[in-house]
Image (tube, coloured by chain):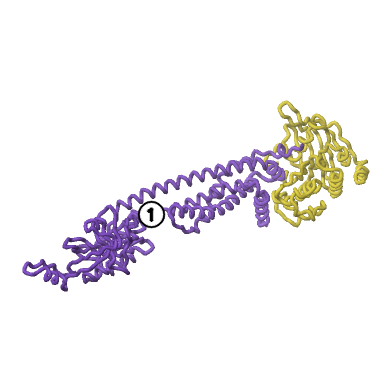
Amino acid sequence: MANNRLRMYMRMVSGSLIRRASRLVIAVLAIAIGATILSGLVTIYYDIPEQLGREFRSYGANLIILPRGDSKITRETLSRLENLIGKNKLVGMAPYRYQTVKINEQPYIIAGTDLAQAEKNSPFWYIEGSWGNSSEPEKVMTGHEIAQTLNLKLDDTFTIQGVKYGERAEASRQDLSAQENQKRDSARQNFHKKLTVKGIVSTGGAEEGFIFCDIDMLDELIGDSFRADVIECSVIADAAELETLSSRIEKEIPELQPRAVRRLTQSQDIVLSKLQALVLLVTVVVLIITMISVYTTMTAMIAERRREIALKKALGAENKLVMSELLGEGVLLGIIGGALGVFLGFEFALQVSLNVFGRAINFQIALIPITIAVFIIITVAASIIPVRKVMDIHPAIVLKGE
Amino acid sequence: MSNKILELNNVSKIYGELKALADINLSVNAGDWLSIMGPSGSGKTTMINIIGCMDTPSTGSVILDGVDISKEDSSSLTRIRRDKIGLIFQQFHLISYLTAVENVMVAQYYHSMPDESEAMEALEKVGLKDRARHLPAQLSGGEQQRVCIARALINSPKILLGDEPTGNLDEENEGIVVDLFRRLHSEGVTIIIVTHDPEVGDVAQRKIILEHGKIIDDIDQSATFGEALKLRSK
């Protein structure tokens, strides 16, 4: 029996919305627009840290890993580190091995690295020519400063030489001719290799004084296994997350010494908090505007439906019953507008993300019930004052014959 | 035991300096058919509002089905109206977004429990079963008024109260509605109708004439009641 009442209630509420659809388009639109902006901004709000984190990764590595003491970092440790950070959080992870070499009897430093990872870590490097790669290890990049000193241009060749790992350099002997000394240098404890300039690196920083080559080629050249002096990581994380990650690394891989690049993480956090505050502010403003819009629509709707309300009261409806019907319509409007808004909001957030950050975002299923619930609350809250006007409608006055 | 369904004792309604009703005394027996006539401003609507529990008198008492409704508050009046009164309006006042049957069910919903089959029966009684799923805008004026009558009757009220129920109808539909009243009266329904139309007023069992808030004439038409109805039917 109670079902009959509920069914009739639903018939009245839905009938009012469906058969008076043209009159309610504005209300639904207002709610849908509000819900679109709300769900869109909430999506962006929660996506900003990741998107912005990725953007900030363009400014270089934010986590530097050093070996503890005089040891070096092995490939096995590198692999453990990679697993600990998580591939999904890593933009790039480039190990560096520094080696002193001679070019034209002058000392320079060559940095062996994973060039592909280094490129991911340092997209801001300006490269004349192109990045080297492991398939052509003899083609390397020189810093701008070195290129100027040695007068090197793209595709020029130069020879590096040095002492193999674990060997000692020996001074040229005065009693030997230059040719004999060169022969000695070419002996087992020394290495030399002809390299080609594939790219010239300009950063405005210390990198301009290095030669960058493939780390495996360097290892082979110096006759040693993988041993990195430092690992530069670009991790998607804010300052707090980096701190946590650093602690985990220290705890789980004690032979490593992580250092967060505070300059970057702090800037990221400041920009992020300001952006999130802005998004929050806009969301609140939108919610207020939606409430005002729903309020005015409901006020107009109740004024327009005075006769119907008076009739219901004349038929014996108590005020609370008529109010519950109108609030029921508000709830239904909230559901329809909210549901529309969720999907339009995602599209809105997607477009914003694609245009601003150049990346797509994921649809958050939880946003569906949350947005709908928020808009039911907003619609009901905005309807309460207009709906209370039902109490002022007197059937005898409104239904007076003409 | 008295079968009085309605009693107005020295009822007055005063708006500022205007006396819309002045010391009205009236009693209506269960099963009566009463017409209230009079020129505009004579107090007809005020009287029907008081009888229909939509207004209260300034002085005097109104006994409806044994209950003095003159001192009741708005909430009690709503309940009494819901239980004892069936209202018919000149402008029909159907809910535009509900079908004919739903409009009848609305009265059930506010009264007790909606029952579609009962609502259909009520519509069948007024000859509108086949129009049950139509919206008011798809019905003629006469059909709308018949839906209004079905709605007024659905909760078996003590009194069927009509405020100019034929005022917006053409002659043909007026005839249909009056015929419906006749049938309801024969079934024992108490009918009180305010009307401007002498022809409608004349077919009632009893007619009172109001002027300046006072009953100036109370005519028992029992003798001509049947004849008037026959003439009306023709």
Q: Is residue B60 above or below residue B173?
A: above
Q: Nearer the viewer, residue A116 or A104?
A: A104
- Residue A113 drawn above or below residue B172: below
Q: Quadrant location of the N terminus of chain A? A: bottom right
Residue in front for this viewpoint, B205 or A14? A14
Mark 1, residue position: A55
Alpha-carbon neighbours of circle 1 within 10 Å: few (<14), some, or many (≥20)?
Answer: some
Q: Is residue A180 visible?
A: yes
Relative placement, left or right, of A61 versus A293 is left
Q: Position of residue B6 (x, y in %)?
A: 79, 40
Across and down, in percent, residue B147 comes to 78, 49
Q: Colour of chain A?
A: purple
Q: Colour of chain B?
A: yellow
How far across and how far down the image is residue A140, in percent?
28, 64
Chain ID, mark 1: A
**Residue occupying image coordinates x 21% and y 69%:** A222
In depth, the one of A394 and A187 nearer the eye is: A187
Farthest-out residue, top: B17
